[in-house]
Image: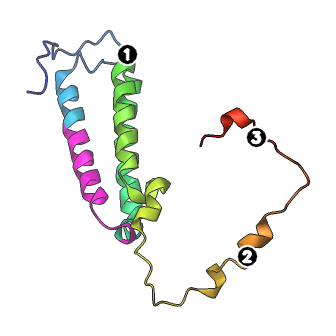
Amino acid sequence: PLFNDTATTEIYTTCDTLSLHDALPIWQLYYQLKGIYVDRIDYYAGIPLDEQYERAEEILSDLEAYKRLNNILIDNNDRELAEKETLIFNEQIDRIAFMNRDNLLDQLPPADPGETPDPDLIDTMPVSDTTMEDNVRTEVPADSISN
């Protein structure tokens, strides 16, 4: 068991919604389903970026289903758990390279030194043309210069 929770499994007919704490089987089902989606994200996170793009529709479908699962927590007014699980969900999204732009450059293959660069990607403005001298004089205080 994941938790030592003494929640009752009785279903109350006087309430509009059941808290996950009041319906232990739903609680267990939530964690079982979450485990399935986390396992899938583990798999997707381990495949190369180009394969992630090829399987983008499948990945997005699983992420949407995982998010809907988290929405159940909100619908059941379990705000504390919903906030915690939303943070976990967001961390899971960051593991998918094509969803996380910070990782994109890390996925590029190293440049071949003998390869001719694509002419459309060459910077045509020399660095010397990107700076301009001005007539502003800047004096550095003598006490700030270290010998």
Verify whether residue 117 appears in magenta: no
**Looking at this view, is 96 or 63 the one in front?**
96
Question: As drawn, is 77 to the left or to the right of 18?
Answer: right
Q: Tell me the distance, in whole angstroms, between the alpha carbons under discs 3 and 2.
A: 30 Å
Position of residue 111 relative to residue 47, above or below, is: below
Indicate the amino acid at tag 3.
Val
**First of labels 1, 3 by sequence position:** 1
The residue drawn where x is 38% and y is 33% is 87
- Of tags 1 and 3, the one toward the viewer is 3
Looking at the rendering, the stretch of residues picked out in magenta corresponds to 32-50
Q: Circle 2 is placed at which residue position?
A: 126
- The numbered disc on residue 16 is 1
Residue count near mark 3 (Cα–Cα under 10 Å), binned few <14, some 14–19, many ≥20: few
The residue drawn where x is 82% and y is 44% is 138
Indicate the amino acid at tag 1.
Asp
Q: Quarter-wise, where is residue 61 in the image?
A: bottom left
Q: Position of residue 58 (x, y in %)?
A: 36, 61
The residue drawn where x is 40% and y is 58% is 97
Q: Circle 3 is placed at which residue position?
A: 140
Q: Position of residue 123 (x, y in %)?
A: 68, 77
Position of residue 53 relative to residue 75, above or below, is: below
Q: Residue furthest top?
A: 14
Question: As drawn, is 34 to the left or to the right of 60?
Answer: left
Q: Position of residue 133 (x, y in %)?
A: 85, 60
Q: Residue furthest left?
A: 1
